[in-house]
Image (tube, rainbow, N blue to C red):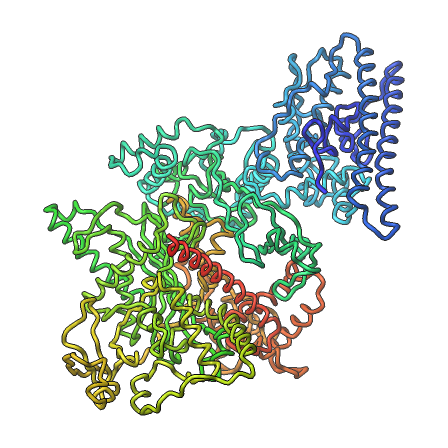
């Protein structure tokens, strides 16, 4: 039951007007009314003489009466709840509502009593006028970063600021002020501040205590107390011997208590307040937090001073100063506004560290002109769209950029001039019905505390949640319905910020191409572009000549034969096209814009196995239909360097079914997904080649034509394309397209593919084109229709999915018909006998394995339904023939004679027969010859097809394993392509993940001392099986065989992983997976392999651990990672490894949901087209 707001628009429990105390504070947070939150040293009152002492005693009595009344109200509510629990039931909503209503009445009575007391106090105060009615107090002005805090943190800030204001007013009354209030903080627990800092007292102003003063006082108080606690946690001095403050031992005692205390109502002095502050500081991720940021800045400054002293004394360690998190708000001793420059004494340097080598922003690798171009692009794009794309000189460009940002506020980003930018919320789908949960709708999810800290993205819509009975099962784990939490799909996440270490200016991380993965512990160094330009001009910073592994370009990614072939071919055709444009326009070649900086890479190439779906296998398994189809999945990416940054423009997923794959997928290629964004440069340029069109389209077409040429040379015979555009709100590969980029309709997308294929046909790469409907005669209702076992069966294609959905329904209809016709004799006239030789030869390949039984009826009905369904959109299912195919038996003609018609058909197709079908057709009587009647057939010899071999080593990438995996990576990390600035940052992060793959979860162990070996620090025997040794044991114990270094330890300044590193990593992963399978089946107690025993211990720990991986158990996380890596590459149907089948089933179900959603949307689109 949610908390209803009070009359003042706040939550009743946190409303200072509904629950006031005489001090103007929230009652349950008042340090004077509530003894569990003790006042700080600065708020301790001195005993007042005479009448003042009596007045204080009366005040204390009133406070005691109020506390008793508050406790009685809370006790009444607790008694009602305890009474309900005593009956074995939870308190119902009606009972709880009645109890809260009673409590509200008591609170209103208490409020009236307090108002009367305040009036009496104001009357007794006479003309002092220092009291202020809390109902008429000005609204609090919240500190910087308040909007980024959680609701709980916002409530805490409001309560603390109210306490500060009331305490300051009370202190001013005791001092006898005439309505004024002291500036600065009124004294708190951390009045002493950071050890070594001076204490000062600011004078009060005659105009009273302003909200800005209260805000600053609250922030400074929290900063100083946090610094004091940080000092006490590291101070080694004895009690009373600390050279910074004599009160250090008090904080040490508090630390000892806080580390053990879990009591939510602890009475220990300052325990609760300190625990809340420390918890916030530990979990704070806000780069602009006004409390945590300056504390980390002060810590960095102190560490730098200590390091300078050590270096001056000759005892330096040679290490740089500690890293600093980008912070916001005032420093520990002041309240500087965000964006305001710091004193010149620290500008341009951090300690004694020379600028450069941070490795956190890609701008560090830019030349000064590239930095200015990048900043100008951001400013002109975000602030002045009219100047976007207009030709201008560099001087005018920089002037326009400075003019665009001149009017920006101090809170705005210093790069783009915009203050607040939010991400596009990722789409959310129901786990059960696969329907999309729209923005603003309510859904249910598994909260993190249920899984032990692991955040799951599974969601259920309201309808599916109501249909849940008892519990749900997700990935082999059951969750109760009552464990699901209700949530509204209205999350709005702001882009993160980063602060420069030198000038303290604030920037969007995306604007300055900041790598958040390098922000280790929130204290990574960062230098803004303005400081980089200044340091380069003053020669304080050396230009970056060698990029670190976190900033490598796309060109350093490993090349394969395919990527090299495509890149070289694209370079030649684009150069020839540019020459043609220059020749046709009569301009010099230098004045003709051309596409530069293009890079093509294969980022994933892995072996996979497509298993035949259950219903289809049951229906056609007896006809020797394959149970699985092995294939190789590849991912191609096109990058272009735009303004010094690589931008991913095109992504392609393909499936290659080789010569070892059984029919009907033998030697076929399936173009699974293709996606692009509209950032190609130069834009708006038309090609001069035949067919015209945009240069961007011409480039993408040439990549696809090059790929078809490459696979044809390798021995593939056909390619299949399903021209299905993404639907509204959907993305195929690249997440969140630009708004100005329109999604093509089905007809336009089909024509886009056909234009490319016709050009490939002119070049002799493609021999013929067709579609699935016409080629397999799906429109015929007679024996000429093809069998379902002949159609290509691809992963994620339209036919396998709909066939699996239709087969149960067709079988049910057949069973119902058979039940109705039970006992009836079949009628009709027997068919005349026909020559078996001529019929089988003529219909060869048309009805494979089909007879007259139920399987034949199912086959026919399935194909008829498919033909009827796709008849209106038949041209979307494109068949591309790279080799000659017999028109009769639909088999590839290779190493055989080919008989073809010398006159092509009007549609461009050529009739051709293999030698076997030609012989059968020639043996028929003249009146039975149908296919060759009236044709002039010519014979030619066709060479044998080459054996399909792999074109390189396997390239595994967990981010590109499936297109859904990459899309999920982008959605979860907000890697978007909706603007060029975000596309640059997203591509930078994608390249970071590709160049820095994660290390294996299971590392090697020394066989001598049993210690784990870090990557690159061990030695491996090339003779013994599974023998590793650490450096120390190698020098002390030695080994009888030759040892080699187990991989090279990469430095961050290196050029990424070498080929040897990749091979070592792949070999280590392979050994780990083999060890995992061995340990699962090993029954020997004292196995010879020490790693086997270690894996067995991990298994036993995982079964008995109560914390689990979600709760933070490192051993469980290691075990879980091993199981996930194994299940991704496992091809065994009955694998003995625990949870392997569950994990594979979970991924399969997730993939099926995505494909089902795609088919449903396409089916609805086809129905709309047919109805229109």
Indicate the quadrant where residue 366 lies.
top left
- From the viewer's perspective, tell me whether residue 241 is left or right of residue 368: right
Residue projecting furthest to the top: 127
Tell me, yes or no, if residue 548 can be seen here. Answer: yes
* Quadrant in the picture for the N terminus: top right
Q: Residue 193, image x and y in percent?
A: 67, 32
Pick the front one: 839 or 1073: 839
Number of on-image labels:
0
Q: Nearer the viewer, residue 628 or 1052?
A: 628
- Which residue is at a point 34% across and 82% down the rendered structure image? 845
Q: Is residue 515 left or right of residue 63?
A: left
- 767 relative to 959 in the view: left or right: left
From what the image shows, is residue 562 above or below residue 146?
below
Q: Which residue does the image show at 40% across and 71% down from the upper left?
A: 864
Q: Where is residue 812 drawn, in percent x and y?
A: 54, 73
Closer to the camera, 823 or 927?
823
Image coordinates of residue 729 in percent, x first then y, are: 45, 50
Q: Is residue 779 above or below residue 1159?
A: below
Coordinates of residue 1001 in the picture (x, y in percent): 56, 66
Residue at x-position 70% and y-position 65%: 1105
| Image vertical order of residue 675 relative to residue 278, above or below | below
> Which quadrant holds residue 1089?
bottom right
Q: Is residue 552 shown to the viewer in this render?
A: no
Front-most of 515 and 24? 24
């Amino acid at each position: 039951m949610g908390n209803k707001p009070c009359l003042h628009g706040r939550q009743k429990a946190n409303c200072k007007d509904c629950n006031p105390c005489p001090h103007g504070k929230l009652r349950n947070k008042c340090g004077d009314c509530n003894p569990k939150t003790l006042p700080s040293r600065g708020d301790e009152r001195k005993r007042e003489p005479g009448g003042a002492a009596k007045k204080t005693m009366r005040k204390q009595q009133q406070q005691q009466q109020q506390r008793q009344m508050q406790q009685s109200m809370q006790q009444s509510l607790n008694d009602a709840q305890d009474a309900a629990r005593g009956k074995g039931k939870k308190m119902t909503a009606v009972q709880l509502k009645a109890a809260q209503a009673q409590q509200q009445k008591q609170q209103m009575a208490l409020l009236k009593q307090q108002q009367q007391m305040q009036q009496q106090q104001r009357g007794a105060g006479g003309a002092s006028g220092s009291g202020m009615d809390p109902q008429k107090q000005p609204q609090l002005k919240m500190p910087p970063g308040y909007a980024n805090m959680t609701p709980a943190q916002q409530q805490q800030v409001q309560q603390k600021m109210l306490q500060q204001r009331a305490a300051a007013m009370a202190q001013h009354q005791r001092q006898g002020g005439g309505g004024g209030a002291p500036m600065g903080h009124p004294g708190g627990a951390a009045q002493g501040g950071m050890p070594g800092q001076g204490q000062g007292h600011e004078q009060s102003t005659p105009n009273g205590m302003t909200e800005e003063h209260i805000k600053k006082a609250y922030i400074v108080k929290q900063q100083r107390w946090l610094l004091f606690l940080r000092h006490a946690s590291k101070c080694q001095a004895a009690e009373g011997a600390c050279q910074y403050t004599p009160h250090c031992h008090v904080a040490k005692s508090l630390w000892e208590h806080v580390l053990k205390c879990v009591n939510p109502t602890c009475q220990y002095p300052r325990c609760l307040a300190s625990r809340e502050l420390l918890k916030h500081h530990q979990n704070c991720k806000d780069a602009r937090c006004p409390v945590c940021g300056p504390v980390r800045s002060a810590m960095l400054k102190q560490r730098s001073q200590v390091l300078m002293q050590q270096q001056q004394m000759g005892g330096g360690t040679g290490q740089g100063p500690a890293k600093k998190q980008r912070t916001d708000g005032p420093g520990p001793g002041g309240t500087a506004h965000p964006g305001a420059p710091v004193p010149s004494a620290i500008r341009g340097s951090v300690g004694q560290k020379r600028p450069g080598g941070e490795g956190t922003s890609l701008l560090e690798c830019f030349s000064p002109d590239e930095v200015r171009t990048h900043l100008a692009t951001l400013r002109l794009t975000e602030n002045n769209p009219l100047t976007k794309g207009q030709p201008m000189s560099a001087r005018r460009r920089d002037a326009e950029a400075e003019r665009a940002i001149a009017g920006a506020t101090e809170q705005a980003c210093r790069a783009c001039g915009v203050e607040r930018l939010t991400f596009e919320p990722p789409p959310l789908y129901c786990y059960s019905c696969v329907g999309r949960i729209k923005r603003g709708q309510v859904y249910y999810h598994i909260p993190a505390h249920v899984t032990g800290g692991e955040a799951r993205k599974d969601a259920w819509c309201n309808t599916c949640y109501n249909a849940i009975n008892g519990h749900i099962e997700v990935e082999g784990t059951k969750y109760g319905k009552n464990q699901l939490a209700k949530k509204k799909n209205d999350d709005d996440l702001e882009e993160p910020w980063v602060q420069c270490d030198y000038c303290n200016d604030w920037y969007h991380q995306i604007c300055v191409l900041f790598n958040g993965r390098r922000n280790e512990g929130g204290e990574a160094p960062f230098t803004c572009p303005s400081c980089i330009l200044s340091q380069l001009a003053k020669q304080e910073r050396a230009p970056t000549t060698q990029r670190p592994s976190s900033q490598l370009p796309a060109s350093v990614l490993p090349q394969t034969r395919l990527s090299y072939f495509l890149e070289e071919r694209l370079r030649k055709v684009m150069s020839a096209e540019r020459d043609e444009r220059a020749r046709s326009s009569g301009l010099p070649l230098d004045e003709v814009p051309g596409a530069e900086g293009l890079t093509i890479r294969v980022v994933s190439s892995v072996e996979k196995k497509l298993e035949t779906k259950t219903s289809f296998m049951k229906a056609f398994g007896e006809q020797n239909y394959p149970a699985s189809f092995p294939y190789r999945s590849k991912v191609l990416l096109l990058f272009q360097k735009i303004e010094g940054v690589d931008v991913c423009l095109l992504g392609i997923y393909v499936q290659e079914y080789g010569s070892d794959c059984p029919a009907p997928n033998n030697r076929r290629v399936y173009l699974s997904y293709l996606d692009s964004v509209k950032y190609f440069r130069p834009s708006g340029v038309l090609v001069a080649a035949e067919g015209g069109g945009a240069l961007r389209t011409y480039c993408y077409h040439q990549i696809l034509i090059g790929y078809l040429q490459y696979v044809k040379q390798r021995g593939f015979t056909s390619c299949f394309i399903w021209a299905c555009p993404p639907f509204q709100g959907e993305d195929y590969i690249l997440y969140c397209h630009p708004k100005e980029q329109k999604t093509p309709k089905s007809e336009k997308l089909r024509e886009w593919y056909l234009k490319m294929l016709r050009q490939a046909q002119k070049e002799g790469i493609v021999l013929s084109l067709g579609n699935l409907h016409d080629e397999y005669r799906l429109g015929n209702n007679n024996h000429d229709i093809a069998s379902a076992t002949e159609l290509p069966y691809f992963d994620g294609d339209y036919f396998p999915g709909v066939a699996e959905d239709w087969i149960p329904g067709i079988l049910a209809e057949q069973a119902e018909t058979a039940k109705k016709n039970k006992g009836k004799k079949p009628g009709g006239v027997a068919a005349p006998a026909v020559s078996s030789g001529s019929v089988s030869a003529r219909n060869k390949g048309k009805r494979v394995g089909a007879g007259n039984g139920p399987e034949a009826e199912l086959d026919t009905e399935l194909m008829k339904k498919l033909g009827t369904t796709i008849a209106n959109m038949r041209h979307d299912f494109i068949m591309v023939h790279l080799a000659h195919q017999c028109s009769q038996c639909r088999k590839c003609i290779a190493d055989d004679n080919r008989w073809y018609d010398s006159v092509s058909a009007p549609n461009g197709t050529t009739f051709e027969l293999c030698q076997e079908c030609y012989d059968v057709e020639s043996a028929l009587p003249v009146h039975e010859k149908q296919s060759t009647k009236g044709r002039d057939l010519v014979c030619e010899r066709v060479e044998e097809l080459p054996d399909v071999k792999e074109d390189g080593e396997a390239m595994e990438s967990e981010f590109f394993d499936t297109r859904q995996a990459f899309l999920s990576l982008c959605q979860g990390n907000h890697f978007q392509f909706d603007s060029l600035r975000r596309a640059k940052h997203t591509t930078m992060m994608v390249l970071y993940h590709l160049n820095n793959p994660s290390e294996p979860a299971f590392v090697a162990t020394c066989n001598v001392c049993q210690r784990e070996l870090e990557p690159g620090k061990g030695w491996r025997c090339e003779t013994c099986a599974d023998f590793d040794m650490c450096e120390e044991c190698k020098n002390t114990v030695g080994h009888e065989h030759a040892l080699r270094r187990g991989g090279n330890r990469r430095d961050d300044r290196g050029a990424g992983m070498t080929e040897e590193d990749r091979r070592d990593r792949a070999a280590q992963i392979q050994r780990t997976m083999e060890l995992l399978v061995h340990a699962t089946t090993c029954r020997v107690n004292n196995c010879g392999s020490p790693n086997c025993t270690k894996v067995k211990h991990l298994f036993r720990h995982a079964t008995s651990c109560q914390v689990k991986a979600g709760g933070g158990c490192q051993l469980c996380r290691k075990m879980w990672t091993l199981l996930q890596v194994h299940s991704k590459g496992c091809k065994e149907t009955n694998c003995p490894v625990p949870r392997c089948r569950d994990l594979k089933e979970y991924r399969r179900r997730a993939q099926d949901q995505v494909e089902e959603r795609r088919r449903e949307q396409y089916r609805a689109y086809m129905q709309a087209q047919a109805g229109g």
